[in-house]
Image (cartoon, rainbow, N blue to C red):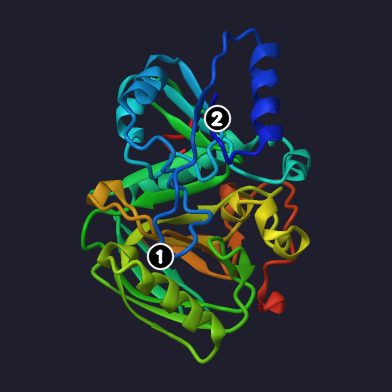
Amino acid sequence: MLSESASRADIVESALLAAQSLGAQTFQVVMPTPANPGPVALRSTGTSLALQQNSAAVAALCRADFVVDCTVEGLLHSRELGQILASGTRVLMISNEHPEVFERMHHDPDMVRRVDLGYQMISAASTMRVTSEAGTDLTVRLDGSFRAGSTGVTSGPGSIAHWPGGLVLAFPARNSVNGMIVLAPGDLNCTFKTHVRTPIRLTVRDDYVVDVSGDGFDARQLASYMAAFNDREAYASSHLGWGMNPGARWDYFDLYDKSQHNAVEARAVEGNFMYSTGANETAGRFTRCHFDLPMLDCSVELDGVSIVSDGVLQGDLAPTCSANAGVLGPTTAADEGPAS
């Protein structure tokens, strides 16, 4: 069990008891949460800094068969993850969510089949295009990208998964992302843990956001936060994909205090398109600044084939019973590793 001093004690203890109930021999690696060097607060980044290149701690994790990652932000974009996975260790990220989220999210027995299908489709495609009535028109070259499907279950030695499952995505290679992202009212900003209230326009050129514009507070806040890092990589494209979990909700942000959840559920919302900025190991980029931006009502095509239409999963990708059916339409206005 990997945690840090700022981890939620109830999540760590629950995970420990669950592992022991399955007969596992368990031990804990508990790191002191490092001081934030600034200049801004870091939230919901997927980039845990807790290990701090500590060779003894990393060696202990590499010797384990299975690591339950209960660090506040998770190891997904951490510098140490590659070494841990290369040792054959499996990693399951259980982020800093409100315990009630775990109660609400039920196991979907059809998740593996649908995510695996989505993974096969994105793996076979060379181009992703994303559009929306709000003005999004983004083209992603998939050749050379790392493509993944997350079911919430690790898929063997050297794999990572994050809870909850239900996400198909790609980490594009360099100079692969171009176009316009328009965040519309109702879309989600996982770092700020809030819904977008006023439109934000992100111009993307050769992977990098070269312009942040909009008439309201949202664009000004986003531009200010990104600029504070004084780091070009803060503006880079990280990963892109779509959500497939019918149990995940987009409308829950206002129901929890920001300190009580980590916005992981929002990333998996069925039919959302998520654009992310920041670290991208495939492109050789690392930065502490990271935004996950799940967007509603987008359409996603792979080599011209419709995958998501106006926020609704198409064909065999759609769940047989959708918890979000009818709520992602225009009237709302608004692990990674190969799938097991």
Q: Which residue is mark 2?
A: 153
> As shown in the figure, which amino acid type bears the numbered disc 1?
Pro
> As shown in the figure, which amino acid type bears the numbered disc 2?
Val
Q: Residue furthest bottom?
A: 215
Q: Residues within 10 Å of mark 1 (few under 14, many from 20)?
A: few
Q: Residue at x 53, y 54 (%)?
A: 44
Labels 1 and 2 touching (C-beta < 8 A): no
Q: Residue at x 69, y 36 (%)?
A: 108
Q: Residue at x 60, y 10 (%)?
A: 24
Q: What kind of element bears circle 1?
A: loop
Percent x, y of residue 335? 47, 38
Q: Which residue is mark 1?
A: 39
Mark sitting earlier along the chain (1/2): 1
How many numbered dots are placed on residues in this image?
2
Q: What kind of element bears circle 2?
A: loop
Towards the viewer: 203 or 218: 218
* Quadrant of the snapshot with the N terminus: top right
Percent x, y of residue 297? 59, 70
Q: Is residue 118 left or right of residue 333?
A: left
Q: Residues within 10 Å of mark 2 (few under 14, many from 20)?
A: many
Towards the viewer: 231 or 302: 231
Towards the viewer: 219 or 243: 219
Q: Is residue 212 left or right of residue 262?
A: left
Percent x, y of residue 309? 56, 66
Q: Residue at x 58, y 36 (%)?
A: 94
Q: Is residue 74 among what the camera can see?
A: yes
- Mark nearer the viewer, 1 or 2: 1
In the displayed structure, 251 sits above or below 239; it is below
Percent x, y of residue 199? 54, 83
